[in-house]
Amino acid sequence: MNDKGNLCLETTAENTPSGKKGKVNIESNDDIQIKPGDDIMLYGDHRGEGKTDEVSIKVMDGTGNSDVPAKLQVNMSEITLTTKDKTGNDANVLDINVNRAKNTKGYLKVRA
C-alpha cells in the first residue's frame, strides 16, 4: 500500500534478481476480469524520455520471441470517443492517425 491507500504492484531494478526494471505478468487459462469502481487510467509518466506523451496497448499472438499483432475484438453496446479533458488550442479536435510504421501513414479500411 502506498501513502494514498493504493495497492501497488511495482518492479524496480532494486527488487528484481536481474537488476532490470522487470514486468508484471498476469496469466490465466480463463478470463481475466477487471471490475473498476470508477475509471481505468493509463499513465505514460514511467516511460522513457520522449515517450511520456503516449501509452501503447499491444494485442499480440503470444507465440514467443517473434510475437506478432493479433486481432482485437471489442464487444459492447456503444462507444464514445471524447476530447473531454484535452487542453490547448485544438481541445475540441479528435485526431485519428493510422500509421503503418513510425512516421509512416497507413490506410484505414472500414466495413459495415
Image (cartoon, grey):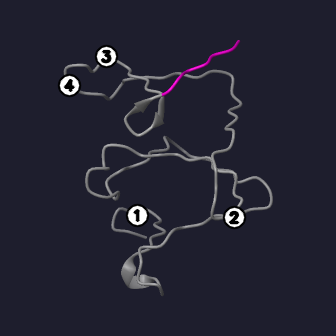
Decide: is 71 above or below 76: below
Mark 2 → mark 3, Cα distance in angstroms: 39 Å
Decide: is 88 above or below 46: above
Q: Secondary structure at mark 1?
A: loop
Mark 1 crowd level (few <14, some 14–19, many ≥20, 10 Å Cα): few
Residue found at x 49% / y 27%: 106
Marking on residue 74: none
Lower sequence index among marks 2 and 4: 2
Q: Secondary structure at mark 4?
A: loop
Q: Secondary structure at mark 3?
A: loop
- From the viewer's side, name the closer residue of 13 and 80: 13
Mark 2 → mark 1, Cα distance in angstroms: 26 Å
Mark 4 → mark 1, Cα distance in angstroms: 33 Å
Lower sequence index among marks 2 and 1: 1
Q: Where does residue 45 sit, x and y in percent of width and height?
A: 31, 54
Residue named by callout 1:
5
| CB within 8 Å, label 2 to label 4 | no
Residue named by callout 2:
27
Mark 4 crowd level (few <14, some 14–19, many ≥20, 10 Å Cα): few
Residue found at x 26% / y 50%: 50
Mark 2 crowd level (few <14, some 14–19, many ≥20, 10 Å Cα): few
Residue found at x 48% / y 87%: 17
Amino acid under disc 2: Glu
Residue named by callout 3:
92
Q: Secondary structure at mark 2?
A: loop
Marks 4, 1: nearer the viewer: 4
Residue found at x 69% / y 22%: 77
